[in-house]
C-alpha cells in the first residue's frame, strides 16, 4: 500500500460483494461456526430496517458494519476493518456512518455486543464514547429443528 490516503467511499454492500464481505469478516475473525455469514448477509440486506455499510478503497472492501433497528434500539454487528487498514480511522468512520443511518430513522440509542474474549476492542468503543453497560444476555435459537 502507498502512504497516500486511500480514496475511500462509504456505501451499501451490493449483492455481488457477498463473497468479498464474507472473506473480509473471516479476515477480521468475525465469523463463527454456528452463524452462517451468507444467511446473515441475506437477512440484513432484506431491509428495510437493516443494511450493511461498507467502506471501499476503489473496488476493494476495506471495512464493513451491519446496522439495523428492532423498533426500539439500534444494533451494530460485524464491524470489521481489514487488518491492512487497521488503525487508520476507518472503524471510527464506519461507526459514525452507522450512527447516522440510525439517527436518520429516529432511533435514539445504539447497542452492540462484545464477546468476552475480545478485550482488545473495548478501548476502541471507549474512544468513540461508548459505555460498558453490564447486562446479562439471554438468547434462544429459533432456526433449529426440534
Ligand atoms: C475494532 C476495529 C473495528 C477498530 O477499527 P480501526 O479502524 O482500527 O479503528 P480506528 O483507527 O478508527 O480507531 C478509532 C479510535 O479508537 C482508538 N482505538 C482503536 N483500537 C483501540 C484499542 N484497542 N484501545 C484503545 N483505543 C483504541 C484509536 O486510537 C482511535 O482513536 P482516535 O480516533 O482518538 O485517534 C478493528 O480493529 C477490527 O476490525 N477488529 C477486528 C474485528 C472486531 O473485533 N470487531 C468488533 C466486534 S465487536
Image (spheres, grey):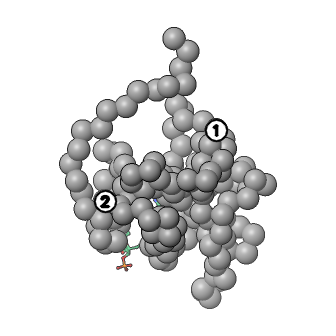
Determine the residue positioned at 51% across, 11% down.
Answer: 146
**Assess mark 1: CB under 8 A from ligand 1?**
no
Q: Residue at x 44, y 65 (%)?
A: 106
As measured in the structure, the alpha-carbon distance from the residue carrying label 1 to the one carrying label 2 is 27 Å
Direction from residue 133 to residue 53 in the image, left or right: right
Q: Quadrant of residue 128?
A: bottom left
Closer-to-camera residue (103/92): 103
Query: Is residue 5 rendered to the left or right of residue 100?
Result: right
Q: Any atom of ligand 1 within 8 Å of the CB at mark 2?
A: yes
Tell me the element at label 2. helix
Ligand 1 occupies quarter: bottom left
| Mark 1 crowd level (few <14, some 14–19, many ≥20, 10 Å Cα) | few
Q: Nearer the viewer, residue 70 or 146?
A: 70
Q: Write the residue at 51% across / 57% down.
A: 67
- Residue 129 locus on image (x, y percent): 29, 71
Residue visible at 66% across and 47% down? 46
Can you give x and y, in whole percent of width and height, for residue 93 in the image?
49, 74
Q: Which residue is mark 2?
A: 122
Whole-percent x, y for residue 66 in the image: 54, 55
Q: In front here: 55 or 43? A: 43
Amino acid at each position: 500500500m502507498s502512504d497516500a490516503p486511500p480514496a475511500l467511499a462509504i456505501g451499501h454492500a451490493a449483492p455481488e460483494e457477498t463473497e468479498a464481505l464474507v472473506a473480509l469478516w473471516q479476515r477480521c475473525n468475525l465469523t463463527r461456526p454456528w452463524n452462517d455469514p451468507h444467511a446473515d448477509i441475506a437477512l440484513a440486506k432484506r431491509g428495510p430496517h437493516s443494511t450493511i455499510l461498507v467502506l471501499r478503497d476503489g473496488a476493494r472492501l476495506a471495512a464493513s458494519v451491519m446496522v439495523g433497528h428492532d423498533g426500539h434500539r439500534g444494533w451494530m454487528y460485524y464491524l470489521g476493518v481489514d487488518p491492512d487498514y487497521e488503525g487508520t480511522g476507518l472503524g471510527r468512520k464506519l461507526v459514525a456512518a452507522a450512527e447516522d443511518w440510525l439517527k436518520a430513522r429516529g432511533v435514539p440509542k445504539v447497542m452492540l455486543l462484545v464477546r468476552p474474549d475480545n478485550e482488545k476492542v473495548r478501548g476502541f468503543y471507549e474512544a468513540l464514547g461508548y459505555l460498558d453497560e453490564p447486562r446479562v444476555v439471554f438468547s434462544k435459537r429459533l432456526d433449529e429443528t426440534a
